[in-house]
Image (cartoon, helix red, strand yellow):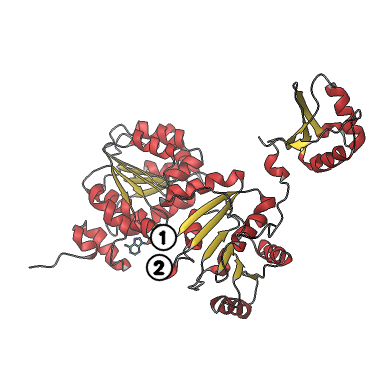
Amino acid sequence: MSAKPKGFDRWDLDSHISRAIAERGWEEPTEIQIEAIPHARKGRDVVGQARTGSGKTAAFGIPAIERCSVLGKIQAIILCPTRELAVQVSEEMGILQGEKGLKIETVYGGTDIEKQAKRLDDGADIVVGTPGRVIDMAKRGHLKMESIALFCLDEADRMLDMGFFPDVLWIFERTVNREQTLLFSATFPQEVLDAAEEFLNDPVHVMSEDLEVEVPEIEQFAIKIGRANKLWALGRIIGSSGSDSQILIFTNTKRMVELIVERLGKFRFKAVGLHGDMPQSKRERVLDSFRDGSESIVVATDVAARGLDVDGITHVVNYDLPDDSEVYVHRIGRTGRMGKKGEAWSFATGSEVTMVDKICSTWGLEIPFIEPPALPEGRERDFVPKRDDWDEVSDYFGMVRVSMKINNSETTKRELVDWIVKESRIPEIAIGEVTSDDEETIVEVHVEKVAYVIDVIKGREFQGRSLKPAIVNS
Ligand code: AMP
């Protein structure tokens, strides 16, 4: 019995491609290639979930090169969100086609339009480009779309982020003789799913395995919290974590590493920092003491934590969310090693909640938003006191709504505003809209003045009565 062919030989690829791959030294196809290439070679529409680094370019590049011949007519078009990516994809495809001789042209904005037009006029077999310039070239008559059989979208989610979808649709609709569509994306927000629905015909869905396996099996939680109270929430996590816990806290800048270490120290939590500006020897010492348990709280940046190999970490805290969802997975992968139990906590300010959604959709995770852990039994006072967080309660214009115990028949808005302005000596512009009903009056006060205004009003009487000012949480 003959053994099943391994590596790229399993597919009996176009000989030019096989040779190019062998020369490059690629031995095995990556997961996304194994999943996508067989379907794409058969002419099926494919929607793939894959990120940069997964080998996705070859996953669509190999079938694209295979189905094109040297004709000088555009048979495949690949749209990318940025010129850098377009250049990269085009170069990769140039290498993959080996000696096949296809003309692969790159079309992107910001460069000499005449030269690009001339090259297209000379005949191209494959075009890789950004949507804006592709449309431009098509409108000027240099890029003929009738001959295009394969339409491919790379990084569809980023295209969406960058507002390219109307352009993509414009191009899609003009590839009237299209036979096959491939769509790749790292994440699948609803809009990409909708677009996929529109663009694809009975597609096969594939996913690169590495997206599925890298995420460790640990408990993950998120806390919606304003900047001012992150330390309070961190205090709760540390305080309830148990005496033999090892906690790794991530933040995005060196400065924040130092600040968090210093502030934790003020509240009697002993922590050490780890960041790229520290000499290597000092970093090693920090790691050693984390490993042997003499330090139990480390605050680090991503760069410093790269390659950090400590087995006993029980908690990872994202004090700040990373900008990149892949970094999230690297961070939380520090805990739960060797099958041990671990917990990952992420703080998200109001505007960062969508980042948590994005992480969930990219990696197929569920990260519930919950309250910080309760105080341990027998403890009444918080480890770090909670503060009024004005930024969290202010609106888009920076106004905070303050309710006062006085109704609409007891005073006029004018009288009340004049009194507040006079007593607290603030400019009138710091007061916004005033509304009142038969129970209370709500006055908008600018976030920069509100703490002070409330303080002043609390200590004085308006027409012989206390107004009991309180923030309205809306
Ligand atoms: P991509 O995700 O397409 O940006 O590819 C990431 C990197 O992996 C690129 O440098 C590719 O050249 C490389 N690569 C893609 N497929 C393979 C493979 N099967 N074996 C080794 N390297 C690969």
Q: Is residue 322 visible?
A: no
Residue type highlighted by circle 1: Glu
Is the C-beta separation of discs 2 and 1 under 8 Å?
Answer: no
Where does the image place residue 132, in percent across and percent down from the top left?
A: 48, 38
- Residue 414 is left or right of residue 246, and the answer is right
**Which residue corresponds to the image point at 26% horizontal and 59% vertical from the top-left?**
17
Q: Is residue 17 visible?
A: yes
**Which residue corresponds to the image point at 54% horizontal and 62% vertical from the top-left?**
316
Q: Which residue occupies the foreground of this view, 471 or 130?
A: 471
Q: Which residue occupies the foreground of this view, 246 or 157?
A: 246
151 in relation to 285, above or below: above
Where does the image place residue 404, in percent across and percent down from the top left?
A: 79, 31
Q: Which residue occupies the foreground of this view, 327 or 414?
A: 414
Q: Element at badge 1? A: loop
- The numbered dot on residue 441 is none
Where does the image place residue 364, in percent across and percent down from the top left?
A: 40, 50
Q: Element at badge 2? A: helix
142 in relation to 38, above or below: above
51 in relation to 163, above or below: below
- The numbered dot on residue 339 is 2
Residue of label 1 = 217
Q: How many numbered marks appear?
A: 2
Mark 2 or mark 1, earlier in chain: 1
Q: How far apart are labels 2 and 1 at the CA level?
A: 8 Å
Q: Quadrant of ligand 1?
A: bottom left
Q: Quadrant of the C terminus?
A: top right
Residue projecting furthest to the front: 378
- Residue 239 is left or right of residue 92, and the answer is right
